[in-house]
Amino acid sequence: MSDVGKKRRLRRIMPDGKTLIVPMDHGVSSPIEGIQNIDVILEKIDGIVDAVVLHKGIVKNSKYVENMHSALIIHLSGSTLYHANEKVLVCSVEKAIALGADGVSIHVNIGSKTECDQLRDAGIISEICDSYGIPLLAMMYPRGEKVEVNKESVKHAVRVGYELGADIVKTCYTGSVESFAEVVEYCDVPVVVAGGSKKSGKELLEEVRGAMLAGAKGVAIGRNVFQSSQPEIIVKDLRRVIHDSTTEVEVVYEGDMATDRGR
């Protein structure tokens, strides 16, 4: 295992132990509004966000990524809207390295019909990442036909990601500082929160502030950024809350936000 390599790459993603990540891997799920030309978004948020999450095809065809200052995380999982919860591997760690990734990410839905397959893949991928010194971001959610999303199910999902070897775990916010503090306590690696459903600028920042107060180490917010007409303003606001430890939420931008459910 290359401890030095992983530590150096993690420092790019989490420069001060905290991180602002913008996932834009949604196109495999559905042709979502806002990512028709990802290079346009990248140019606006590059250097403000710490990292972006992209699929390999976007990276291969981008005219911007090769000169990008923000860290690159390549997503290894995918599913379409027709089988939304049934994630499968669509890229290898080796391919991500060849494309210049600073890290990789996987998506696991605890409670889905193919949970067992997703767990197996996550465990194998974590070992490969250790071998190459590549940080692994595990997107862990309680999702399935009979799964209730609450503090306990989110805590379980996060714990699974930690126990399978993830370096960073992403999950949904549980709605309060107190409940999310219990989630974070159950995971001994950094936890970041997803953006979730449509929110106003103030609501989004207040939620992020609550997560940070609970012990989260950052966010991974996609739709609330790339579906905005001014994504650079939103990420600047988010950066203040995450990296400057802003305790009072002062919204610079209150414009259009995301319209879809968080990933």
Image (cartoon, rainbow, N blue to C red):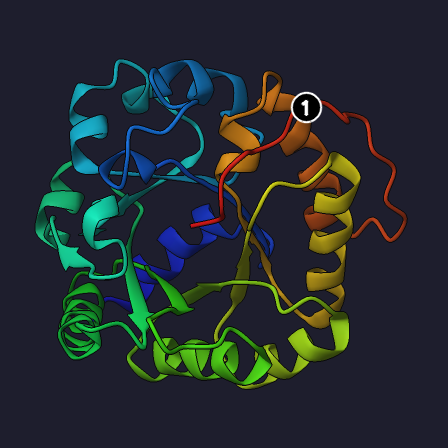
Q: Is residue 114 visible?
A: yes
Q: Within the image, what quadrant is residue 3 found in? A: bottom left
**Left-right relation of 134 to 170:** left
Query: In what quadrant of the picture does the N terminus appear?
Result: bottom left
Residue 47 rendering spot, x and y as whole percentages:
53, 28
Question: Could you tell me which residue is drawn at 17 percent across and 67 percent down?
Answer: 125
| Neighbours of disc 1 within 10 Å: few (<14), some (14-19), many (20+) | many
Q: Within the image, what quadrant is residue 109 found in? A: bottom left
Mark 1, residue position? 233
Question: Could you tell me which residue is drawn at 33 percent across and 71 percent down?
Answer: 144
**Left-right relation of 32 to 217:** left
**Left-right relation of 231 to 65:** right
Rendered view: 175 above or below 52: below
| Helix, strand or loop under label 1 | helix
Comparing 157 with 4, the one in front is 157
Comparing 36 with 11, the one in front is 36
Task: State how many labels appear.
Answer: 1
- What amino acid is labelled 1 in the image? Ile
Residue 120 rendering spot, x and y as whole percentages:
14, 77
Rendered view: 50 above or below 256: below
Residue 6 rendering spot, x and y as whole percentages:
32, 61
Residue 193 rendering spot, x and y as whole percentages:
55, 58
Rendered view: 214 above or below 34: below
Q: Is residue 79 visible?
A: no
Question: Could you tell me which residue is drawn at 22 percent across and 28 percent down?
Answer: 59
Rendered view: 195 above or below 67: below
Comparing 92 with 180, the one in front is 180
Question: Could you tell me which residue is drawn at 14 percent across and 70 percent down?
Answer: 121
